[in-house]
Image (cartoon, coloured by chain):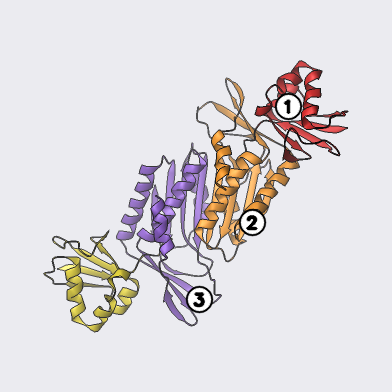
Chain colours: A yellow, B red, C purple, D orange
Amino acid sequence: MIDVLYFAWVRERIGLPKERVETGAQTVADLVEELRQREARYAAAFEDLSALRVAVDQELSDFDAPLSGVREVAFFPPMTGG
Amino acid sequence: MIDVLYFAWVRERIGLPKERVETGAQTVADLVEELRQREARYAAAFEDLSALRVAVDQELSDFDAPLSGVREVAFFPPMTGG
Amino acid sequence: MEVRVQSAPFRPGEELDAFTAAVPGAGAVVSFTGIVRDDSGTLAEMVIEHYPGMTEAALTQIAEDAQARWSLSGGLIIHRFGVLAPGEQIMMVATAARHRQVAFEAAEFLMDYLKSRAPFWKKERTATGDAWVAAKDSDEASLDRW
Amino acid sequence: MEVRVQSAPFRPGEELDAFTAAVPGAGAVVSFTGIVRDDSGTLAEMVIEHYPGMTEAALTQIAEDAQARWSLSGGLIIHRFGVLAPGEQIMMVATAARHRQVAFEAAEFLMDYLKSRAPFWKKERTATGDAWVAAKDSDEASLDRW
């Protein structure tokens, strides 16, 4: 079980901020592929990965990062702080 | 008649902040030469011109600046504002 | 270095004076304040979303990176989230050092990383609709100088 | 742009808030405060001498140069003269612009010119004697980047 979080327009497209996902995905990319298959709103949110960033256990990471032992994955657009 | 002003250690070496000088000097350098001839304290103050800056009528200038029509000349070390 | 993530407003002047009082020995203090602009004249409010937990960790990491890179007398990062009106303060950084160049560089470093590496997202609400503020390529590019 | 030359102390925080309130539309405000350091632990006071008349003219010129070079929402220069204790504020600049890079650059420009082109001279008074602060080659060199 992994907590999956969505922020900004990713959250809006998917329609929820957070969910627990039962997955056997080995990498973030595998998890994305699983989510895409679910429903159109997920496919829409993950349509262009170059427009997305991912954090694994609250650290910026990559889509090829392994998920072994990971508790939390978050997807969001490029950040606009400051 | 020109007002001649001294600041910082130039003022201290010469021993006064300001004086009126009757001079026929054509340039700042000529004026410096006249002042140097006066007394040892002037010679000491103007010993090394590379350590001095000059303002003519309250604008940073050069030692070869002409004095025609000038009302005020100031000598001081490099500035240390900020 | 102090890091604060809060929804409450703050007064940059008060923060600056308190920060300066707490860094004796510093000769130079630089502050940056980010303010909600209303370029179009139609902005009702700005909503700032963030990632609780990661936000604090990311800001702390940026602060530590700055301290490792420069000899600072102190540093401060405040960043708000929630609903903000035009003209309100969004965030502030302050840096203190012996000399001005270090204080300026560290403040710019904090800002550059905060822009692109801290998990905040801005949405503008106007009479004609809402829009997420897009990240600028120039913000990402500005990291290259460090 | 406002220029003030004064012997009276000022509060950077108050000045920052007042400045920010007066520049609506700005998204970025940068401030720099210079403070009397006591590196040796023996400084009794710092005496700042200036050239009345020329000082105001030089600061105004520097401010105008900054405004000609960048699109600023506002700017502020305050510089004190007279006798200052360690820890007291010597001077402050503030700049406001739409974006952070302009505000930072203009503040650094003001500081660089203020250091070497405004007629102020600092003297340090310590228990063992007085000494004029020497200008640094690096301060003169820092003008080359503009």
Left or right of residue B7: residue A82: left
Q: Residue furthest left?
A: A24
- State the residue in front, C143 or A11: C143
Dividing the picture into quadrants, the one containing residue D20 is: bottom right
Q: Which label number is shown at residue D67?
A: 2
Q: Is residue D31 above or below residue D44?
A: below
Q: Is residue B55 above or below residue B19?
A: below
Dividing the picture into quadrants, the one containing residue D98 is: bottom right
Cβ atoms under marks 1 and 3 closer than 8 Å: no
Cβ atoms under marks 3 and 2 closer than 8 Å: no
Q: Chain of mark 3?
A: C
Name the amino acid type tagged 3.
Answer: Ala
Q: Which residue is mark 3?
A: C44
Secondary structure category for the residue under label 1 = helix
Secondary structure category for the residue under label 3 = strand
Q: Position of residue C97 (x, y in %)?
A: 47, 41
Q: Chain of mark 1?
A: B
